[in-house]
Image (cartoon, helix red, strand yellow):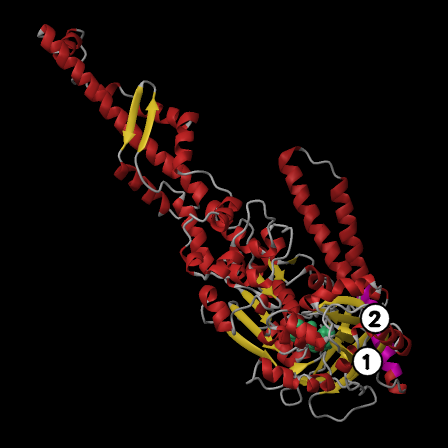
């Protein structure tokens, strides 16, 4: 915090007064929105139209109230002074009094706020001074200025610690906070990018990828109205991570973003998690073709259609059925909808057939009558009609056949529908995936080409529960049988995007028809289900190669000392990658060595010492997944957050204690990447506990 000298004290007082004015307007707006909402909720609408209108208005006002409430904390955080002496205050939302020419508070996403983030002494963007404010509630607790135009500080400029340093020194709470006051130039450039297609942000641990992703989501909502109308989705790897980031967008005044995992997006709650080998195999896009083949195999694969209608037995030739099938299959409709088209085409053919056979029957009767009596019935009938003064064309059997009535009757006929069901059954997504993975006779060109051991991993038993790895398959099957998902988004943000399998990419792309996305991740941190090695490989099949690739280069989390100890590991994971640098410095990481029998005692002691030395700090204990249960049973969670290595991606702690790195490395393929993730979670202190001895992995006793 800058030293509050006399000039600074004066400035703090001045800012305090301004913050109070902004706060007053904020309170008025919030009170107005709440009162209006109350009034709308108390009204009694007359009729469906008014009820609908009331719902819409109440929805809008509820959102407005939540938006304002979310932005209250740290409402004002910046100020820019332009060379022409214009002063603008920057905050989480915009506030404007009608009578004023300038806004009282400029939304951080507005163009007018851009210089607050992007101005540098080399490119001052018309600024003389940039000021950061620190607030506790509505009290200004500190401020610091940067002079950008080369002018000398005056008594009204407060030159002190960088606001970024102050922000980074705050204790971790277990929930990510916003970085709206201190977004750095390279981050801001991505957040504010006008690019509406696919933006990919890569960078090492702690470089702010999540920060950028979330602020980008808020920016899109503000700056791209069409995308915002269709909604913004933020997709994360697991609920633990979503919980970690859950507060960021509300505190940016944005409550309308949907936060979801892939499972939540598909609306499927799997019963269990698949082993990674299975997850990797089930992630292959080639299975999409196999699923499509299974569905096709249930679409009138061949043969004629034979049905009794009334007393008649009608048979449609196989080429007639094949033509209906081809038309339905090329209609672009999903299986269950195309079934209706197929059925209607069959009915059309049946009606034609009935008309033809009816006409033939009448002709046959006429011919028999003529042969027996010598009368031409058609001519007799026509002569009779002429005598009556009616000019009639010769009657034919077809004229007496009411095709429309017959057609309508057949459309409603349950018996006919059953017959169609034999050829083209209604399917559920579960039927399709189940058939692919359980039925050895199912068409599955890709699956068949796999070695027997892999086929065995993919096979499921009839009653097996669905796993997380089945979710993208079920979602793919849903799109094949019921059509594309109803709920789509205007912009999708994916965090830890390196984790997604090809099948998961397909489910995301289905939900973002406009292909407007921000994808952030780091392949050096990829889990074992990931097979793609880079973005081109991961995105190529669904999004092509035209994406805007940005790289973040500075870590704001992991200290330089910790990064230095992970350099060898990183070089093994990704030999060509240049090490990243950090703006943080801290204690050198420590390694403790223990035996399986004394692991719990060693860990206990370490946690106790850390809590005593650094009260209130958040400690994360990261271990191989297999060891989680043992540590949980020992009550570790009373002192620290216990995180299985597979779920540590994206998380952050003041201190991290990494248990048995060798076990993490060997627990699953790509274990070195799991270890790299685990070692880079701490903002201050890293302690590694190595476990030596024959029973080192997973068998330690307390
Ligand atoms: N501009 C910033 N101002 C303040 N804090 C920042 C800024 N950028 C990043 N941070 C902080 O740095 C930490 C790491 O950021 P973040 O989690 O976004 O990194 P990441 O690249 O997503 O990391 P990982 O690869 O481990 O998932 C967070 O605590 C975040 O709040």
Point out which mark residue 600 bears. 2
Q: State the residue in front, 491 or 235.
A: 235
Q: State the residue in front, 61 or 212.
A: 212
Q: Is residue 640 visible?
A: yes
Q: Nearer the viewer, mark 1 or mark 2?
A: 2
Mark 1–mark 2 distance (CA, rounded to whole Å): 46 Å
Q: Is residue 154 left or right of residue 421?
A: right
Point out which mark residue 143 bears. 1
Q: Is residue 363 left or right of residue 127?
A: left
Residue 307, how many percent across, how many down? 33, 27
Which quarter of the rendered image does ligand 1 occupy? bottom right
Hey, which quadrant is residue 238 in on the image?
bottom right
Labels 1 and 2 touching (C-beta < 8 A): no
Q: Does 129 appear in magenta?
A: no
Element type where label 1 sits in the image: strand
Please state the extent of the stretch shown in magenta in the rendering: 9-23
């Amino acid at each position: 915090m800058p030293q509050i000298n006399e000039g600074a004290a004066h400035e703090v007082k001045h800012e305090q007064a301004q913050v109070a004015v902004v706060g007053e307007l904020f309170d008025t707006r919030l009170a107005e929105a709440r009162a209006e909402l109350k009034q709308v909720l108390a009204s009694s609408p007359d009729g469906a139209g008014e009820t609908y209108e009331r719902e819409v208005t109440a929805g809008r006002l509820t959102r407005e109230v939540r938006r304002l409430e979310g932005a209250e904390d740290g409402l004002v955080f910046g100020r820019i002074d332009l060379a022409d002496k214009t002063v603008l205050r920057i905050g989480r939302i915009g506030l404007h009094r009608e009578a004023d020419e300038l806004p009282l508070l400029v939304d951080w996403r507005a163009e007018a706020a851009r210089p607050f983030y992007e101005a540098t002494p080399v490119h001052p963007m018309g600024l003389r001074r940039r000021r950061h404010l620190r607030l506790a509630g509505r009290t200004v607790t500190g401020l610091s200025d940067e002079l950008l135009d080369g002018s000398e500080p005056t008594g009204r400029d407060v030159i002190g610690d960088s606001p970024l340093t102050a922000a980074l020194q705050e204790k971790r709470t277990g929930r990510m906070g916003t970085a709206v006051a201190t977004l750095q130039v390279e981050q801001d450039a991505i957040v504010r990018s006008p690019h509406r297609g696919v933006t990919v942000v890569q960078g090492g641990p702690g470089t702010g990828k999540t920060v950028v992703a979330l602020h980008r989501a808020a920016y899109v909502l503000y700056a791209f109205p069409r995308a915002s109308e269709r909604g913004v989705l933020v997709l994360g790897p697991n609920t633990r991570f979503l919980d970690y980031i859950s507060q960021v967008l509300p505190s940016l005044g944005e409550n309308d973003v949907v936060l979801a995992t892939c499972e939540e997006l598909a609306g499927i709650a799997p019963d269990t998690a698949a082993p990674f080998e299975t997850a990797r195999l089930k992630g292959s896009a080639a299975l999409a073709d196999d699923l499509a083949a299974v569905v096709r195999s249930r679409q009138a694969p061949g043969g004629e259609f034979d049905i009794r209608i009334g007393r008649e037995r009608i048979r449609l030739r196989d080429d007639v059925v094949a033509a209906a099938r081809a038309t339905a299959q090329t209609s672009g409709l999903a299986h269950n909808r195309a079934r209706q088209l197929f059925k209607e085409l069959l009915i059309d053919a049946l009606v034609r057939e009935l008309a033809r056979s009816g006409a033939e029957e009448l002709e046959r009767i006429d011919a028999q009558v003529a042969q027996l009596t010598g009368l031409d019935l058609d001519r007799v009938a026509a002569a009779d009609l002429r005598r009556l003064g009616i000019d009639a064309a010769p009657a034919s059997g077809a004229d007496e056949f009411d095709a429309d009535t017959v057609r309508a009757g057949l459309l409603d006929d349950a018996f006919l529908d059953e017959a169609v069901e034999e050829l083209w059954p209604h399917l559920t997504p579960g039927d399709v995936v189940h058939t692919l993975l359980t039925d050895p006779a199912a068409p599955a060109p890709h699956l068949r080409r796999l070695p027997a051991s892999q086929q065995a991993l993919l096979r499921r038993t009839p009653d097996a529960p669905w796993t997380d790895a089945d979710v993208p398959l079920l979602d793919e099957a849903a799109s094949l049988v019921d059509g594309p998902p109803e709920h789509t988004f205007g912009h999708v943000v994916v965090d830890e995007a390196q984790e997604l399998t090809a099948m998961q990419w397909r489910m995301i792309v289905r939900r973002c028809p406009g292909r407007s996305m921000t994808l952030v991740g780091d392949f050096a941190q990829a889990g074992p289900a990931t097979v793609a090695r880079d973005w081109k490989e991961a995105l190529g099949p669904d999004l092509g190669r035209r994406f805007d690739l940005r790289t973040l280069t500075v870590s704001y989390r992991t200290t330089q000392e910790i990064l230095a100890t992970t350099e060898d590991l990183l070089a093994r994971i990704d030999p060509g990658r240049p090490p990243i640098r950090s703006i943080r410095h801290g204690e050198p990481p420590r390694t403790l060595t223990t035996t399986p029998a004394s692991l719990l005692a060693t860990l206990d002691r370490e946690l106790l010492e850390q809590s005593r030395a650094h009260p209130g700090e958040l400690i994360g204990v990261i271990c191989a997944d297999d060891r989680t249960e043992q540590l949980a049973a020992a009550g570790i969670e009373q002192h620290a957050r216990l995180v299985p290595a597979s779920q540590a991606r994206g998380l952050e702690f003041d201190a991290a204690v990494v248990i048995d790195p060798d076990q993490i490395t060997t627990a699953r393929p790509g274990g070195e990447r799991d270890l790299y993730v685990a070692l880079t979670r701490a903002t201050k202190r890293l302690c590694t506990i190595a476990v030596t001895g024959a029973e080192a992995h997973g068998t330690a006793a307390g």
